[in-house]
Image (cartoon, rainbow, N blue to C red):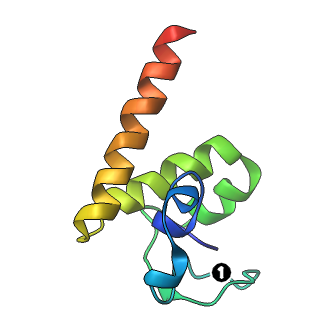
Amino acid sequence: MPTSYAAAPIADQILMEDQGMPPVWPSPYGTVRGISIIPLYPSAPHAATMDLCLYEWLAITDALRSQEPRVHELARNQVEHKIRAASIR
């Protein structure tokens, strides 16, 4: 299951061809091969399949854990955007 920069909303802002194999959460039901990233909690990937908003937040969190400055910056911008959008409601 894609995560970090390979998942929405960050995947829309980055060229995947430049990144190599995508980061993924290991899953027996997954359809994407990539570099395995340990999820924050063992059941997080399963929970993310049932809640798109949760999936986006978990993927953004994984991007914040990234050592790549561009990915980290994109994730930080997404957090700011989501917080601003939530405060407008």
Q: Nearer the viewer, residue 84 or 59?
A: 84
Q: In the figure, is residue 11 to the left or right of 50? A: left
Q: Quadrant of the C terminus?
A: top right
Q: Quadrant of the N terminus?
A: bottom right
Q: Residue at x 71, y 46 (%)?
A: 51
Q: Is 85 situated above or below 71?
A: above
Q: Is residue 24 visible?
A: no
Q: Nearer the viewer, residue 43 or 1?
A: 1
Residue 30 is situated, as x and y percent measured from the top left of the image, at: 72, 81
Q: Residue at x 50, y 53 (%)?
A: 58
Residue 34 is situated, as x and y percent measured from the top left of the image, at: 55, 88
Q: Nearer the viewer, residue 5 or 31?
A: 5
Q: Is residue 19 visible?
A: yes
Label count reads: 1
Residue 31 is situated, as x and y percent measured from the top left of the image, at: 75, 83
Element at badge 1? loop
Q: In the figure, is residue 70 to the left or right of 81? A: left
Q: Is 48 situated above or below 78?
A: below
Q: Is 77 situated above or below 69?
A: above
Residue 71 is situated, as x and y percent measured from the top left of the image, at: 34, 62
Task: Name the residue that disc number 1 marks.
Answer: 27
Q: Amino acid at mark 1?
A: Ser
Q: Residue at x 62, y 90 (%)?
A: 33
Q: Label 1: few (<14), some or many (≥20) within 10 Å?
A: few
Q: Residue at x 38, y 61 (%)?
A: 63
